[in-house]
Image: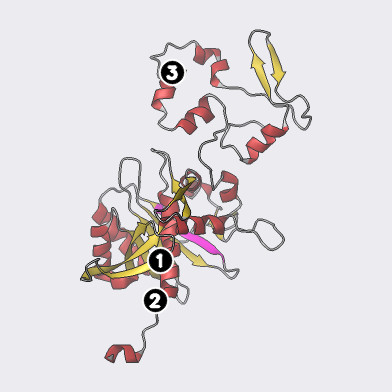
């Protein structure tokens, strides 16, 4: 097995820990095992400082160790790719193998979905240099799993052009409910609502563990707002997404409730980095209640993860909204 170090706790990390963990000693010119008692594997730690064509470069050369330390915005990337060290930062709730377990190698992305089948859409509007708008559309299969049927990361930066494209996707995939981030997308959500009314809703993250999801039709002063929006506890919904991905059956076997279409990997493999970049730390509310707060390193976007979460919220809202009956029209 040969590869680049990733995160502490990954499968590759566990294999390394089971090896004799040899490090190169330049003075003696020999490999020195860190754990000679381990006989499962013979392991060798090789990093860029051992490469003569790299370590001989002047510090101002773009490929020098010193330049990479500055240029790589992520500490994880520098540790993994340059020093060959497994990253042990904040807790990593999702690893690459968790997402790879969700693959269906026979299933490809779809180009439409016909009635009576319905789907749910989540939209995370890209805001900032490293973020891109992502639309995620999924539907339930006969095993009660969420199947990703369409995803798009927009290279198009014009928000109104994005709205136009998404407006075409909603009927094309018979989207029953769409939920979008309203932080960067208040105008875009408003434009979608002109065409789809409450079939497209904006969502704002909150930090209220006691209320996972709430409909807001009025502001804090009781005045009716122009467009209804959803308030969703950020930590609750991130943890819900993680639980679906890492779900196990009653026997303890891995049985994800998210299915990723992997027949054409180039279409979807970029998703993995956007799910596994998140880190989790424990924080405490003013009232003393503890909760998990998730963040992601600067320069490592997590737009696809949040688009998935908004699609989950779209489904939850559909089950939360009471059905319209005749008496409601006259009450």
Residue carrying label 3: 66
Farthest residue toward the top? 27
Q: Quadrant of the C terminus?
A: bottom left
Cα gap from disc 3 to disc 1, whole angstroms: 47 Å
Circles 1 and 2 in contact, beta carbons < 8 Å: no
The rendered magenta stretch, by its main secondary structure, is classed as strand
Residue carrying label 1: 213
Mark in front: 3 vs 1: 1
Which badge, 3 or 1, comes first in the chain's sequence? Answer: 3
Mark in front: 1 vs 2: 1
**Residue 72: horizontal and vertical position, in percent?**
42, 28
Which badge, 1 or 2, comes first in the chain's sequence? Answer: 1
Q: Quadrant of the N terminus?
A: top right
Residue drawn at x 57%, y 27% as measured from the top left: 84
Cα gap from disc 1 to disc 2, whole angstroms: 11 Å
Read off the magenta span: 145-152
Q: Nearer the viewer, residue 129 or 233?
A: 233
Q: In the rendered image of this protein, does residue 85 appear above or below residue 9?
A: above
**Residue 65: horizontal and vertical position, in percent?**
47, 19
Q: Nearer the viewer, residue 289 or 241?
A: 289
Residue carrying label 2: 321
Helix, strand or loop under label 3: helix
Q: Nearer the viewer, residue 208 or 180?
A: 208
Q: In the rendered image of this protein, does residue 27 appear above or below residue 218?
A: above
Left or right side of 28 for 246:
left
Residue 316 appears in view: yes
Circles 3 and 1 in contact, beta carbons < 8 Å: no
Residue drawn at x 42%, y 11% as measured from the top left: 58
């Amino acid at each position: 097995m040969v590869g680049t170090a990733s995160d502490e706790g990954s499968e590759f990390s566990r294999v390394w820990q089971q090896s004799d963990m040899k490090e190169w000693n330049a003075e003696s010119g020999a490999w020195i095992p860190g754990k000679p008692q381990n006989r499962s594997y013979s392991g060798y730690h090789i990093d860029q400082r051992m490469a003569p064509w790299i370590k001989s470069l002047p510090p101002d050369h773009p490929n020098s160790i010193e330049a990479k330390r500055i240029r790589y915005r992520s500490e994880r990337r520098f540790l993994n790719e340059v020093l060959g060290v497994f990253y042990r930062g904040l807790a990593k709730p999702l690893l690459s193998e968790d997402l790879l377990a969700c693959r269906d190698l026979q299933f490809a992305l779809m180009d439409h979905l016909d009635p009576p089948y319905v789907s749910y859409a989540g939209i995370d509007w890209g805001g900032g240099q490293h973020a891109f708008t992502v639309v995620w559309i999924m539907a339930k299969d006969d095993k009660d799993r969420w199947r990703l049927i369409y995803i798009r990361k927009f290279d198009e930066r014009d928000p109104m052009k994005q709205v136009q494209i998404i407006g075409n996707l909603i009927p094309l995939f018979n989207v029953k409910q769409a939920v979008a981030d309203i932080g960067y997308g208040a105008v875009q959500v408003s434009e979608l609502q002109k065409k789809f009314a409450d079939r497209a809703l904006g969502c704002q993250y909150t930090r209220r563990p006691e209320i996972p999801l709430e409909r807001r039709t009025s502001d804090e002063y009781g005045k009716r707002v122009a467009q209804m929006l959803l308030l969703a506890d950020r930590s609750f919904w991130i943890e819900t997404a993680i639980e679906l991905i890492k779900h196990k059956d009653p026997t303890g076997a891995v049985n994800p409730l998210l299915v990723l279409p992997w027949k054409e990997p180039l279409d979807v493999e970029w998703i993995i980095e956007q799910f596994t970049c998140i880190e989790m730390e424990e924080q405490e509310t003013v009232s003393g209640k503890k909760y998990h707060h998730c963040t992601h390193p600067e320069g490592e976007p997590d737009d696809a993860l949040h688009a998935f979460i908004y699609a989950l919220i779209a489904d939850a809202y559909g089950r939360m909204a009471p059905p319209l009956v005749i008496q409601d029209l006259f009450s």
